[in-house]
Image (cartoon, grey):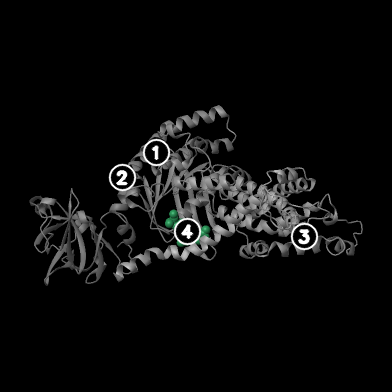
């Protein structure tokens, strides 16, 4: 059953159209992440779901009710804000109970819930403090506690981790995910950080300029991006894109790669992924992830069907488990991910194996997937 | 050699520049406070005399009916003035904060009275409240011949006309302070409260107004010192009359020290006012400075 169903939503602020026809449906208990660059309308969409803004067109259903004209308090949602938005004049206990008191819940029950939530989030010892006396991470927990206490049908999170330092962010990421597995409530989570999106989501909606570019599982979004924007946005380091001319020889498509110093190399495209027939002798955008260009090993030589290129190493960046090697192909910089022991030094030539089975191609003008 | 003189000069320059101001303040503010204190213990009349006479001016002061009327008036004026200014200022600020149109213009309208001196305010209200010139006459001309509004000439009510004029002048300023406070509140807090199910009245009562506490505090301090030193408003509006029914301590002091040539008596009343102001200002400064250290 869908816990949340958004149909063809438009939102205008004055004459500026911020959301341009968004449709999403979220199953009960699902963890949906809305991800996209800053200003693409994620918060606006979340505010529409919460009822803090009204839609210009389209409909929103929570459970089996259309909630377009229902006020935030009756939508059965709870929200965690980027700035935490704790009530500054109240202590933490009051912050947690305020929403329950507003709903006229009996005192004893409120106390019980506050106790339960604060134990779950390990904030029992903070209950009598004011928000200003808490650290960022503690405020973050209280903000989540306030939402949890309400036990709503849908949780909305608006970039809840972006004000934390890197280490705490990673910890809280895991913690939120664990929490979700425990309480199993539907979550809509907004972030601009694609790693957060990939690690937490059951499904990801990638937005740009008020339009959903792709709405799919993390695996599919990563392996089968529907356009160049999604391909470039998801994954770190980012996917390599290079213009490449297509050739077809005896039914076998290949790409002509300039490896520098006037030499060139033909990369054969496996037949099963080759939608390139109509593109003979034309240029496409060839996309390949850094981990698909690795050092030349014996095993890869057996399976790789001779897709080995010799290139001059330009820059080397060790990351620990892997080393990133930067080369030039068809005049653009390309990142390769190799085993640290195999990395050559800048200026040296290195043999690199290109795994073409996961290569993807984009239309050079529209950026759409071919 | 030259260099060391230049160095010395440079080091002393700030002190040299500030010295005249410091000197002037020492003499004309603190010096004269001490001088007034001394005079209040003497039997000075038109001209100061300097032989010490003890507390007899203070004893006389606290036995003086007119002084008690002035103090009572200050209590009425001060409490009403502060309360109404804050209530009205807060209300206007909340209304203005609803993102209405032409907010800038409306804000300016409310703030303009601030730009007038109390003399102008007093004079303008004197005309408006004068039964034979202003509001009452206007209503009579409209045909409401039964309408009377004679507070200005009614010794029971005259102090309330001072309240009206004072409120008219200072509300805009209080409103501006509250508006700044309201604008400083994170919108997300209000949204969070909405999602938590609170209606606007509850949001204002439980969250917004309590978090404006520092603004209340500053407003009360500022308004109470305006109230205590109110002088020009009363002089322009009622001249303390009818009789001495709308006297405030400041006009009382002026009347005795300079009109009735009882300098020592006036000085004693000035010292009592000084004590009252210090009683308000010192705790305020103390808490402000301590707060700074904490932050
Ligand atoms: N209340 C508003 N009035 C006018 N424009 C707005 C308003 N809220 C957001 N916008 C505009 O809508 C766009 C999307 O904003 P937002 O949803 O906050 O982006 P995101 O959360 O993805 O960073 C931005 O260009 C922003 O300027
Ligand atoms: Mg945002």
Q: Nearer the viewer, mark 2 or mark 3?
A: 3
Instruction: Return the chain for callout 2.
Output: A
**Which of disc 4 and disc 1 is earlier in sequence?**
4
Q: Residue B72 falls in which quadrant of the image?
A: top right
Helix, strand or loop status at disc 4: strand
| Residue hosting label 4 | A21
Residues at marks 3 and 1 touching, judged by CB atoms closer than 8 Å: no
Left or right of B69 in this view: A28: left
Instruction: Return the chain for callout 1.
Output: A
Asked whether residue B42 is in view, the answer is yes
Q: Nearer the viewer, mark 1 or mark 4?
A: 1
Helix, strand or loop status at disc 3: helix
Q: Residue at x 27, y 54 (%)?
A: A236
Return the x and y of residue A294 as percentages of the image width and height: 15, 55
Measured Cα–Cα span from mark 1 to mark 4: 29 Å
Measured Cα–Cα span from mark 3 to mark 4: 65 Å
Instruction: Return the chain for callout 4.
Output: A
| Residue hosting label 1 | A180
Question: Mark 4: is the Cβ under 8 angstroms from ligand 1?
Answer: no
Asked whether residue B249 is in view, the answer is no
């Amino acid at each position: 059953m869908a816990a949340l169903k958004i149909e063809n939503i438009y939102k205008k602020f004055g004459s500026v159209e911020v959301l341009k026809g968004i449709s999403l449906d979220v199953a009960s208990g699902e963890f949906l992440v809305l991800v996209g660059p800053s200003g693409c309308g994620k918060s606006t969409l979340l505010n529409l779901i919460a009822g803090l803004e009204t839609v210009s067109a389209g409909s929103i259903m929570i459970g089996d009710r259309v909630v377009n004209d229902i006020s935030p308090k009756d939508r059965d949602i709870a929200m965690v804000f980027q700035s935490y938005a704790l009530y500054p004049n109240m202590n933490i206990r009051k912050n947690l109970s305020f929403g329950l008191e507003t709903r006229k819940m009996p005192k004893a029950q409120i106390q019980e819930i506050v106790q339960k939530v604060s134990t779950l989030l390990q904030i029992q010892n903070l209950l009598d403090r004011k928000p200003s006396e808490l650290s960022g991470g503690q405020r973050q927990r209280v903000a989540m506690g306030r939402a949890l206490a309400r036990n709503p049908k849908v949780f909305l999170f608006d970039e809840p981790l972006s004000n934390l330092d890197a280490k705490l962010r990673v910890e809280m990421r895991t913690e939120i995910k664990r929490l979700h597995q425990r309480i199993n409530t539907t979550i809509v989570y907004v972030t601009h950080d694609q790693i957060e999106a990939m690690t937490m989501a059951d499904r990801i909606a990638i937005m740009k300029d008020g339009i959903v570019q792709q709405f799919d599982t993390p695996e599919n979004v990563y392996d089968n991006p529907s356009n160049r924007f999604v391909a470039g946005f998801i994954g770190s380091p980012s996917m390599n894109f290079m213009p490449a001319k297509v050739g077809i020889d005896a039914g076998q498509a290949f790409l002509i790669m300039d490896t520098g110093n006037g030499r060139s190399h033909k990369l054969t495209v496996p037949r099963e992924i080759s939608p390139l027939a109509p593109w003979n002798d034309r240029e496409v955008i060839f996309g390949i992830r850094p981990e698909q260009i690795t050092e030349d090993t014996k095993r890869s030589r057996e399976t790789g069907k001779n897709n080995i290129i010799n290139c001059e190493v330009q820059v080397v960046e060790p990351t620990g488990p892997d080393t990133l090697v930067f080369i030039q192909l068809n005049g653009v910089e390309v990142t390769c991910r190799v085993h640290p022991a195999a990395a050559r030094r800048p200026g040296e030539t290195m043999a690199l194996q290109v795994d073409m089975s996961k290569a993807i191609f984009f239309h050079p003008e529209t950026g759409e997937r071919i | 050699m030259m260099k060391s003189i230049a160095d010395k000069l440079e080091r002393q320059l700030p002190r040299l520049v500030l010295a005249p101001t410091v000197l002037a303040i020492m003499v004309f503010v603190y010096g004269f406070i001490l001088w007034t204190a001394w005079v209040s213990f003497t039997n000075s009349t038109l001209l100061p005399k300097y032989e010490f006479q003890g507390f007899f001016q203070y004893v006389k002061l606290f036995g003086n009916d007119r002084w008690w009327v002035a103090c009572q008036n200050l209590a009425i004026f001060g409490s009403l003035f502060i309360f109404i200014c804050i209530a009205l200022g807060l209300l206007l600020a909340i209304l203005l904060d609803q993102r209405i149109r032409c907010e800038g213009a409306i804000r300016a309208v409310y703030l303009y009275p601030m730009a007038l001196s109390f003399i102008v305010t007093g004079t303008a209200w004197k005309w408006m409240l004068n039964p034979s010139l202003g509001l009452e006459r206007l209503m009579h001309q409209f045909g409401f011949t039964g309408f009377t509004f004679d507070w200005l000439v009614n010794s029971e009510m005259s102090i309330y006309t001072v309240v009206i004029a004072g409120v008219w002048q200072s509300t805009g300023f209080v409103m501006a302070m509250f508006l700044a406070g309201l604008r400083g509140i994170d919108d997300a807090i209000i949204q969070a409260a909405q999602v938590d199910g609170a209606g606007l009245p509850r949001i204002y009562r439980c969250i917004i107004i309590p978090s404006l506490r520092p603004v209340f505090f500053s407003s009360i301090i500022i308004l109470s010192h305006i109230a205590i030193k109110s002088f020009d408003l009363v002089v322009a509006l009622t001249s303390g009359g009818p009789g001495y029914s709308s006297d405030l301590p400041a006009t009382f002091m002026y009347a005795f020290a300079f009109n009735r040539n009882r300098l020592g008596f006036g000085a004693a009343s000035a010292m009592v006012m000084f004590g009252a102001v210090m009683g308000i200002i010192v705790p305020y400064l103390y808490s402000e400075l301590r707060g700074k250290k904490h932050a």
